[in-house]
């Protein structure tokens, strides 16, 4: 964390509360989790698939911690928040401090949450879940749609019609299967109020993963990932990471099916 | 079935489920326990049951897992196909009867002959052609349905399915991709100091602007009226219907590019005699600086001059939204141009002189 400390002046108003400090002492930038799993079926160990191995029993079955480092987050400008005036009170635990009025995220906390989110995404993908990418910003919309297409998942970067989740049968004219996971690259919409889909997913019991910026409300998001949601390079990094996590989940599913049909 | 129940009761996980309400069969071979406290909402939308806690998968034979969504779709598709077949049969029988009635050969009786025959046998004085009796093949009468948009497990085929208009947004997505690749190509050329060849410029003379109705047919989707349509002479126009103010009701069409021509009920702006009413019309145009760049055609009925001018003003403001930047739309919203004035005439109440005015109050 030395490179962050030198660049940031911690202001007394925005110091992390003490519980967060104790949490951080448990992290490090390149975390090696309790890996009591000898044989996972992921590359490079493309060995035998062991069906007795239950992905749900391992803290990081899909090895998502290897996908990124805190340095990668820093280089992608994930630590940049908005100005102090637009800070949402509920985002305070995730903020490291501020510099010249601009808020800075604590990347150790972000890394922890991102690992949780990627792990969850990979598990959902491994169980053939429908994943819906939601973003609402003209700058990044095309990239998000492209990412979803390449993962063979779904995207919604357009105007949200009211009853997509809550009135799906009427909207689509038929009994529809709703997404099993919603990934928000922005939780705010174009008029800077919370995206309707966050509340609607919560209503329909659909788990959500969301990139929450300093002006967002992280309450309703199941796996919030505090970080910058505006800069194109941050969004590119998130898309790359989610795509890789989904790819790993699907690969596991394919290998498992191949093993079962043998 | 009894064996399945027995297996469930023996399963040790069964005892852990607290708020069990009932055991509901989905099909003969697969059972699902419903936890009404949590799963009620989810249950309607999940796919085939896959409950690991019950460990029933070993007992249950592996069937093709068809989701509720797919099953519902298949039922409806089958019903629709049967219905259409029935209608086609009726149509053909009717055609032969009609040919016999007209004394013509049933084999060579075409659609034009049918139309002629119907017009002859059922003369209609109605003005609207769509309201007159007609006999057409069922494919034309009943609107075409979209094919199954999802596979057996309920997973939609199109990656933009959840937007509700996948074809339109796919088109827009492809447009952006194409534009980006063209920009990249241009950048590469500039880096190599190459300029585009003027003689190889693309000519748009062979292409044509499609009106909204044809576009909708191509996309098999309905488009919203926010996007401007194009008339035969290539000018973009937007029609705002239901412009209401007090008792006035109107329709406004804004055309761009234009010369600032304003037509109300086929008359010029002098339809309104007072300057105030005319100013009401011009306000949105002045505000957005579009006075000389758009034409306005309005039809209005009901109410008086104040109501009618207010209705048209609202219509013009809403029409201009499609021809103006987002910033300006925001400014219009703040200026109150886009706010509909819901104030209506309040009725007089008995025991009072007017709507609010009371008779003189006497203490004793």
Image: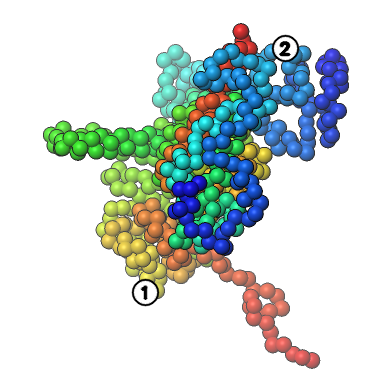
Residue A39 appears in which quarter of the rendering?
A: top right
Rendered location of residue B140, percent (x, y): 48, 27
Mark 1 residue crowding within 10 angstroms, few (<14) / some (14–19) / many (20+): few
Residue B113 appears in which quarter of the rendering?
A: top left
User: What is the CA distance from the residue labelled 1 to the residue labelled 2?
Assistant: 83 Å
Secondary structure found at label 1: helix
Between A7 and B341, the one lying in front of the other is A7
- Viewed as shown, does residue B10 lie left or right of A231? right
Dot placed on the residue nearer the N-terminal end, 1 or 2: 2
Chain to which mark 2 belongs: B
Q: Name the residue: 44% across, 69% down.
A: B305
Picture disc at residue B275: 1
Secondary structure found at label 2: loop
Residue, far left: B199
Rendered location of residue B7, percent (x, y): 84, 17
Q: Name the residue: 35% across, 49% down.
A: B237
- Viewed as shown, does residue A116 lie left or right of B167? right
Q: Name the residue: 58% across, 58% down.
A: A15
Rendered location of residue A66, percent (x, y): 52, 31
Chain to which mark 1 belongs: B
Q: Is residue A15 visible?
A: yes
The residue to which callout 2 is attached is B61
- Viewed as shown, does residue A97 lie left or right of B66? left
């Amino acid at each position: 964390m030395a490179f962050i400390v030198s660049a940031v002046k911690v202001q007394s108003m925005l110091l992390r509360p003490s519980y967060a400090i104790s949490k951080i002492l448990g992290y490090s930038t390149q975390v090696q989790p309790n890996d009591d799993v000898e044989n996972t079926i992921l590359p490079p160990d493309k060995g035998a698939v062991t069906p007795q191995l239950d992905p749900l029993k391992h803290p990081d079955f899909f090895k998502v911690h290897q996908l990124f480092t805190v340095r990668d987050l820093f280089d992608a400008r994930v630590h940049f928040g908005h100005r102090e005036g637009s800070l949402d009170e509920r985002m305070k635990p995730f903020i490291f401090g501020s510099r010249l009025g601009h808020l800075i995220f604590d990347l150790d906390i972000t890394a922890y949450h991102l690992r949780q989110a990627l792990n969850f995404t990979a598990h959902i993908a491994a169980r053939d879940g429908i994943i819906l990418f939601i973003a609402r910003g003209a700058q990044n919309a095309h990239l998000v749609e492209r990412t979803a297409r390449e993962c063979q998942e779904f995207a919604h970067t357009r105007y949200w019609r009211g009853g997509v989740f809550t009135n799906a049968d009427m909207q689509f004219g038929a009994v529809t299967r709703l997404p099993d996971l919603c990934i928000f690259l922005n939780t705010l919409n174009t008029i800077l109020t919370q995206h309707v889909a966050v509340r609607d997913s919560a209503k329909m019991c659909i788990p959500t993963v969301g990139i929450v910026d300093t002006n967002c409300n992280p309450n309703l998001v199941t796996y919030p990932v505090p970080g910058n949601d505006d800069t194109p390079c941050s969004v590119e990094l998130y898309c790359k990471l989610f795509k890789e996590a989904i790819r790993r989940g699907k690969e596991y599913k394919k290998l498992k099916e191949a093993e079962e049909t043998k | 079935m009894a064996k399945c129940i027995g297996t469930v009761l023996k399963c040790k996980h069964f005892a852990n489920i607290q708020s069990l309400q009932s055991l509901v069969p989905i099909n003969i071979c697969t059972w699902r326990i419903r936890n009404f406290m949590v799963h009620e909402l989810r249950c309607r939308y999940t796919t085939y049951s896959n409950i690991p806690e019950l460990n029933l998968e070993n007992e249950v034979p592996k069937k093709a897992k068809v989701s509720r969504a797919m099953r519902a779709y298949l039922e409806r598709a089958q019903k629709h196909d049967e219905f259409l077949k029935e209608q086609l049969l009726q149509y053909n029988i009717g055609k032969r009867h009609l040919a016999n009635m007209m004394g013509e050969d049933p084999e060579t009786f075409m659609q034009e002959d049918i139309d002629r025959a119907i017009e002859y046998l059922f003369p209609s004085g109605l003005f609207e052609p769509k309201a007159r009796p007609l006999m057409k093949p069922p494919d034309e009468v009943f609107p075409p349905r979209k094919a199954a948009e999802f596979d057996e497990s309920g997973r939609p085929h199109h990656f933009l399915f959840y937007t509700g208009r996948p074809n339109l947004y796919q088109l827009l997505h492809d447009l952006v991709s194409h534009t980006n690749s063209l920009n990249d190509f241009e950048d590469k050329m500039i880096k190599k100091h190459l300029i585009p060849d003027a003689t190889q410029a693309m000519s748009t003379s062979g292409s044509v602007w499609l009106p909204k109705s044809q576009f909708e047919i191509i996309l098999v989707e309905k488009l919203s009226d926010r996007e401007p349509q194009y008339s035969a002479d290539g000018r973009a126009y937007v029609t705002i219907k239901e412009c209401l103010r007090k008792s006035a009701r109107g329709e406004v069409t804004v055309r761009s590019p234009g010369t600032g021509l304003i037509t109300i009920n086929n008359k010029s702006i002098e339809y309104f005699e007072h300057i105030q009413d005319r100013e009401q019309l011009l306000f949105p145009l002045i505000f957005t600086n579009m006075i000389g760049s758009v034409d306005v055609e309005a039809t209005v009925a009901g109410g008086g001059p104040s109501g009618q001018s207010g209705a048209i003003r609202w219509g013009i403001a809403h029409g201009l939204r499609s021809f103006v930047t987002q910033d300006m739309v925001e400014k219009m919203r703040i200026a109150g141009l886009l706010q509909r004035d819901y104030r209506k005439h309040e009725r007089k109440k008995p025991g009072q002189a007017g709507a609010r005015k009371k008779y003189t109050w006497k203490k004793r």
